[in-house]
Amino acid sequence: MLPENKLKELIGMMNSVSGSAIPPQPPILEMFNIAMDEKMLDYLLAVGTEPHTVAELEAIYRAQGHEDWEQHWKEVLQMSFVHPYTDTQRHLYQLSPIFPGWVEFFTAGPDDPKRFAVLNKFMEFWGMLKLMNRSPMREMSDGATLKAMAAGDPPKVSTFTVQPEGRNISLNQPLESRQEVLTLGSVYTILERNKDEIAIANCFCRRYKKMSKGELCDLDIPQESCVALGAIAKQLIENGTARPMSFEEAVAKMAEFEDNGCIHTTFHNHNRANEEEIVICNCCPDCCLLYNGYRQAGLSKLYARSFFSPRMLDESKCVGCKACMKIGCPAISIVGGKAKVDNTLCVGCGVCEQLCKFDALKA
């Protein structure tokens, strides 16, 4: 067993580089015991939280009396213990957050007993979180989150609808013309910005469902559905976790996922929604921790931020077909043969609009 005081120190460091914190509960400590030996633990503690060049990271390793740098560096990257600091400063590497971050990237890799064991322990922790996050704990958590947001702390992730509305903005100076078409808030804009560096990897949530229950996603969304962008995509391709994907394939995949009722959830660098996007998760309430967890009290909807709120555009067009309820949305019910939306339960994903074939709902 690794020294608990050292493990807790590392967990604190990994939490400090993220907008999300994972407490050192027993399953998390066990997860790290499975993933690393004391040599790796001591190295990551020596690396600290500051960004470093590869040469500096090598110097830290050699200062500890080790010689096999190339093999060690390969293992660090394969385990996703570090990632590029930013997309524009990719020559620098920083310690990865625990989740979203290290757990997600490591367990998405090729089939391996260690990956499965780490994933099992993380899901054990998630089960504990669902038990803890009920009244009055949930209300206390939401209150703390609202205070943080009021103070300017950004949410953790952002969600996107398929066809968001545009808006007109008056400017006091002319715009420089550029040959590009952008849709405000659309996930396709993000793909366009990263069109030369896109990768797709396994969704660790769907992998866990297949591994633990032998079942596939109820919405027929494949395991290979987690899209990485920019410098993170490049690292995951190089370490064998993800495969490269063209912009055209990525657009086609997104359309396929949308038709199945997925929610595009974008994770950002350092898990802060005001920083660059690094991953687009194509989520569903069947498999995914984020939305399945919200429905089962495992996560506050304040974790995600969306500026869309569904409303009944034309009630006469609603036929009560329940297509908008395909993903098991807790905010929609059928009352008197018509869809009704409870906005207090809505996370603003916009999927109901995508699934409605009668133009009755609008997000």
Image (tube, rainbow, N blue to C red):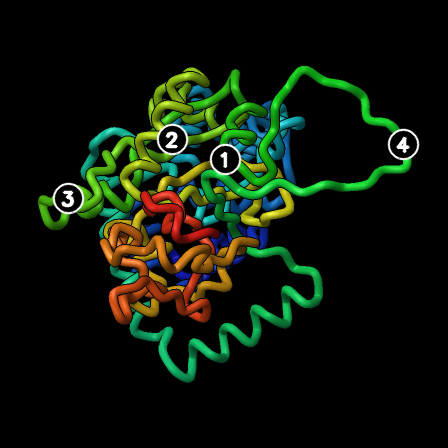
If you read the primary sequence from the N terminus, does the residue marked by circle 1 or circle 4 appear first?
4
Residue annotated with mark 1? 187
Compared with residue 228, is residue 204 higher up or lower down, i.e. above or below? Answer: below
Question: The residue under label 4 is which amino acid type?
Answer: Gln
Provide the residue designation for mark 2.
254
The image quarter containing residue 150 is bottom right
Residue 208 as seen in the image, left or right of residue 215? right
Label 1–label 4 contact, CB within 8 A? no
- Name the residue: 66% across, 26% down: 88
The x, y position of residue 187, in whole percent, is 50, 35
Quadrant in the rendering for residue 77: top left
Badge 3 amino acid: Met
Q: Earlier in the sequence, mark 3 or mark 4?
A: 4
Q: Which residue is mark 4?
A: 173
Say which quarter of the image contains residue 60: top right
- Disc 3: which residue: 211
Residue at x-position 76% and y-position 41%? 169
* Residue at x 40%, y 21% (from the top left corner): 237
Q: Secondary structure at mark 1?
A: helix
Which of label 3 and label 2 is nearer to you?
2
Q: Are marks 2 and 1 in contact (CB under 8 Å)?
A: yes
Instruction: Measure the alpha-carbon separation of dots 1 and 4.
Output: 28 Å
Task: Looking at this view, name the residue that lies furthest to the bottom.
Answer: 136
